[in-house]
Structures are given as structure tokens and as C-alpha cells.
Image (cartoon, rainbow, N blue to C red):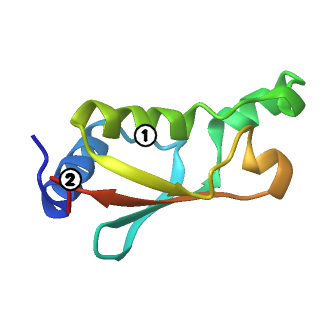
């Protein structure tokens, strides 16, 4: 069970050591206590949707996956901005900031 931001950060960073590939261009930062920011510089999923001509219908699958990890770990969170669809399509950039709560704190 993840009970602190330090434990979550350690898990996330260890997981990315194993799972991050060269085509993934994003930055992960911790701008404040219990806050995690993911910024996607270039989205491989959006790029693929663009190549096959469906970018206008693409629904982000990257951040819902991150949120599923939090749900599976039973870490409560709020996300800013709350977005449906794809920010790369609408804004030309993509980032999410998560404020996390551990054990009701």
C-alpha cells in the first residue's frame, strides 16, 4: 500500500526505469508537496492517430492509464485540468497536474 508521496514517487520512478521507451517524450516533476505534474512534449499516441487520419477523433489513453494506476493503488487524486479528448488536438500541448491524498491526508 502506498501511504506517502515519497513512496509513490519511488514506485513511479522505478517503474519508468523499466517501462520508459525512447519514443516517450514527457517530463515528470513534483512542483509542490503531494503534487505530481506530467508534461507531454510529444505524444506518440497522438502522432499515430494523426498519421492514420483520426486525430480529430482521438481520445487520450495516456492519462486515463495513469489514473487507473492511482485507482489500483488506492491513492486519491484530483486532476487539473480535467480534460476529455486530447489536449494536443485542441491546445497543441499536453499536461496534467495531480494533487494526491494519502490515508485521508
| Image quadrant where residue 101 sits | bottom left
* CB-based contact (under 8 Å), mark 2 and mark 1: no
The structure residue drawn at horizontal position 59% and vertical position 31%, both measured from the top left corner, is: 61
Q: Which residue is mark 1?
A: 66
Residue at the location (48% across, 44% down)? Answer: 22
Question: Any mark on residue 8, and which?
Answer: 2
Q: Tell whether 38 sits left or right of 91.
A: left
**Residue 105: mark:** none
> Does label 2 or label 1 sit earlier along the sequence?
2
Instruction: Tell me residue 97's x, y (percent).
Output: 50, 62
Q: Secondary structure at mark 2?
A: helix
Image quarter hosting the N terminus? top left
Q: Is residue 76 visible?
A: yes
Count of marks overlaid on the render:
2
User: Which residue appears at 15% of the width and 63% of the height?
Assistant: 6
> How many residues crowd mark 2 within 10 Å: few (<14), some (14–19), many (20+)?
many
**Residue 93 horizontal/vertical position (percent):** 73, 59
Instruction: Give the crowd class for mark 1: few <14, some 14-19, many >=20 residues within 10 Å.
Output: few
8 relative to 25 in the view: left or right: left
Work out whether residue 18 or residue 80 is closer to the camera in this orientation and state it: 80
Q: Quadrant of the C terminus?
A: bottom left
Relative image position of residue 62 (x, y in whole percent): 55, 36
Looking at the image, which residue sits at the far bottom? 32
Q: Secondary structure at mark 1?
A: helix
**83 lies above or below 59:** below
Q: Position of residue 48 (x, y in %)?
A: 73, 29
Left of 1 or right of it: where is 56? right
Residue at figure coordinates x 43%, y 40% from the top left: 66
Q: CA distance from mark 2 to mark 1?
A: 12 Å
Amino acid at each position: 500500500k502506498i501511504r506517502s508521496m515519497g513512496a509513490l514517487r519511488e514506485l513511479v520512478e522505478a517503474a519508468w526505469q523499466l517501462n520508459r521507451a525512447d519514443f516517450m517524450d514527457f517530463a515528470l516533476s513534483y512542483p509542490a508537496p503531494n503534487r505530481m505534474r506530467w508534461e507531454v512534449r510529444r505524444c506518440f499516441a497522438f502522432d499515430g492517430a494523426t498519421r492514420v487520419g483520426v486525430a480529430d477523433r482521438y481520445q487520450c489513453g495516456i492519462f486515463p492509464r495513469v489514473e487507473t494506476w492511482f485507482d489500483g493503488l488506492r491513492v486519491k487524486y484530483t486532476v487539473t485540468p480535467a480534460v476529455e479528448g486530447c489536449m494536443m488536438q485542441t491546445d497543441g500541448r499536453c499536461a496534467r497536474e495531480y494533487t494526491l491524498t494519502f490515508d485521508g491526508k
